[in-house]
Structures are given as structure tokens and as C-alpha cells.
């Protein structure tokens, strides 16, 4: 990333470090606090930077990381980016850091990593105790998702062309459409997000990074089954003005898991943790039990 990065991104980078994993170098940020660590999993196309206004408000030990291909982590190409590899990397990072008890808060693509954790936990295949999980604004039920036109193009044969044409103006325009009318994307936020997406030319692999949408179809039985049958504490935290992971997705998750506790954020969009961090944290604390 160039020396001209936004100050907020430079400060975020300075507060973290990189861990070597089997997949590559992964950027992580940690904070001290009470209780088992809260692991915050970001979505596509952004990074752990999304949670910068969340971690200090939680009053808990936290861990955030940039998945391979995102933010400040390595962005290998050519490469087949998968939810399974993202999950493997997360498990490896937790092992390196010595975490034995874990709560997870997951957003967007990160919710698929979370459901893979649920599936592995059901098979007694995790090296740590997965205590509580909160899913937020993730399109886990693809049949109920309203994909943006750019997502459809990136998932098509024209995906490499669309990625090659990516630029800051187009990115900010599309990214802004994910925010609610009452909490629009600020120009500084758009600039910071673009700096992280385009770091190491990451915008050129957007079509590879969004392949997780196809995995959500291919592994629906595994991941929906995990949501339905996992015997831990699962909560849903949802911005109801999300134009992608709409209330239809939330309704579908409620059908899968009727007993799930739900916190609705009526005036927030796809990025509730960015739009209103205080409201997002209040929901997380309620669903994590304090």
C-alpha cells in the first residue's frame, strides 16, 4: 500500500501485525478485555477495518483478521479462494494465538465461515470451544438474496473483465448502495475502503474473491443443516434496510432456526457495524449475553 494511504487505514495497520500461515501472511488485530475472545469475521469485499469502531466498545478481548485476498493480508493470484480455506486460516490463527474458548460475530461472507465452523463443531473437529455465534447480514440463503448487478457480472464469464475495469469511482458508487438512506456512506469511509480493497491490486481479483457465493449454493445442505442443528447459542443481528441480504434472508434463517434470538436494526443497511457502531455493539452484547 502506498505511503499516501488514508490516516485511518495507516493507524489501523499500525495497530496490528501479520501472522504466517500455510496459506500466506494474514493481518490480525487484537485487543485485551474480559472473557473468552470475540472473533469478528468480515465480509466481501471489505476487511477487518469494518470493525474498528466496534472492538473498543465491546469491553471484551477481541480478534479480527483480514481473510486471505482481503485488506492487508496476502493476495495470491492465481488462486482458488474458498470458504473452507478461510476457515482453515482462522483455525490456524486461533491456534497460533492460543485461544481455547471463542465467541464469533460474523458479517456477510464471514457468516459462511461461521457456518462452516458450526459444521465442524458438530463433527467435533474444532480444536477450541465454540461458545456463541452471532450472524449479521449475510446472504446465507442464496435463493432469497438480491444480488447486485455487479455481483452477477463478477460471477459470470465476464468477471475478469469487470475486475480489470474496477476503479475508485465505480467502487464507491456501488459500495454506497449498500448503506441505508439514514446512514449514507461518508466520503472518508469510501476512500479508506477503496485503499484496502485495492491494496496489492486486490480489486483485480474481485471475481475470484466472490466465488464464495457459488459455494453457498453447492454446500447449502451442509451449512443450512449446521444452522438448524448446532447445539450452541446462535443469534441473528440484522440491519433491515439491507438491499442484498434482505429481510427475506432473515426470515429464511428464522425458519431454519426458530429458537434463534434476533436483534433487528430497523434503520440500518448492509453494514450496520459501520453505519451505527453503538447500535451494532448493543446488539452483539445482548446476543453474547452481556
Image (tube, helix red, strand yellow):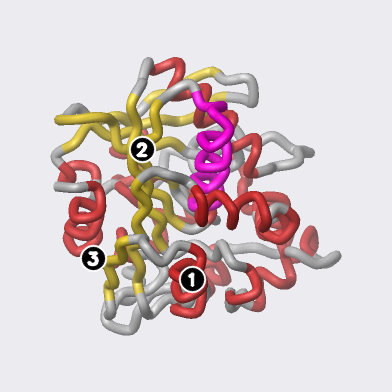
Residue 10 seen by the camera: no
Q: Residue sitting at 42 percent across and 38 percent down?
A: 3
The x and y percentages for residue 184 are 33, 76
Q: Element under label 1? A: helix
Mark 1 lies on residue:
255
Range shown magenta: 111-126
Label whose residue precedes the other's in the sequence (2 or 1): 2
Mark 2 lies on residue:
39
Q: CA distance from mark 3 to mark 1?
A: 27 Å
Mark 3 lies on residue:
276
Q: Residue sitting at 43 percent across and 36 percent down?
A: 65
103 is within the stretch colored magenta: no
Within-10-Å neighbours for mark 3: few <14, some 14–19, many 20+? some
Q: CA distance from mark 2 to mark 1?
A: 26 Å
Label whose residue precedes the other's in the sequence (3 or 1): 1
Q: Element under label 3? A: loop
The x and y percentages for residue 105 are 36, 47
Amino acid at each position: 500500500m502506498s505511503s499516501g494511504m488514508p490516516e485511518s487505514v495507516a493507524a489501523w495497520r499500525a495497530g496490528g501485525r501479520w501472522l504466517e500461515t500455510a496459506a500466506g501472511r494474514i493481518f490480525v488485530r487484537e485487543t485485551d478485555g474480559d472473557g473468552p475472545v470475540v472473533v469478528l469475521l468480515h465480509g466481501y469485499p471489505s476487511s477487518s477495518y469494518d470493525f474498528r469502531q466496534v472492538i473498543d466498545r465491546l469491553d471484551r478481548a477481541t480478534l479480527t483478521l483480514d481473510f486471505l485476498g482481503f485488506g492487508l493480508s496476502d493476495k495470491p493470484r492465481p488462486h482458488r479462494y474458498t470458504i473452507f480455506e478461510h476457515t482453515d486460516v482462522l483455525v490456524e490463527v486461533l491456534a497460533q494465538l492460543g485461544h481455547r474458548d471463542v465467541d464469533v460475530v460474523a458479517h456477510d461472507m464471514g457468516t459462511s465461515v461461521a457456518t462452516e465452523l458450526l459444521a465442524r463443531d458438530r463433527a467435533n473437529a474444532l480444536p477450541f470451544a465454540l461458545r456463541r455465534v452471532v450472524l449479521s447480514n449475510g446472504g446465507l440463503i442464496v435463493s432469497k438474496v438480491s444480488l447486485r448487478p455487479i455481483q452477477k457480472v463478477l460471477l459470470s464469464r465476464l468477471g475478469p473483465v469487470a475486475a480489470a475495469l474496477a476503479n475508485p469511482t465505480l467502487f464507491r458508487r456501488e459500495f454506497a448502495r449498500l448503506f441505508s438512506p439514514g446512514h449514507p456512506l461518508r466520503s472518508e469511509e469510501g476512500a479508506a475502503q477503496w485503499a484496502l480493497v485495492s491494496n496489492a491490486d486486490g480489486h483485480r481479483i474481485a471475481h475470484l474473491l466472490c466465488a464464495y457465493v457459488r459455494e453457498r449454493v453447492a454446500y447449502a445442505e451442509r451449512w443450512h443443516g449446521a444452522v438448524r442443528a448446532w447445539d450452541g447459542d446462535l443469534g441473528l443481528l440484522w440491519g433491515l434496510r439491507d438491499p442484498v441480504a434482505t429481510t427475506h434472508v432473515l426470515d429464511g434463517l428464522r425458519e431454519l432456526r426458530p429458537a434463534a434470538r434476533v436483534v433487528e436494526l430497523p434503520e440500518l443497511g448492509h453494514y450496520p457495524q459501520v453505519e451505527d457502531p453503538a447500535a451494532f455493539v448493543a446488539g452483539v452484547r445482548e446476543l453474547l449475553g452481556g
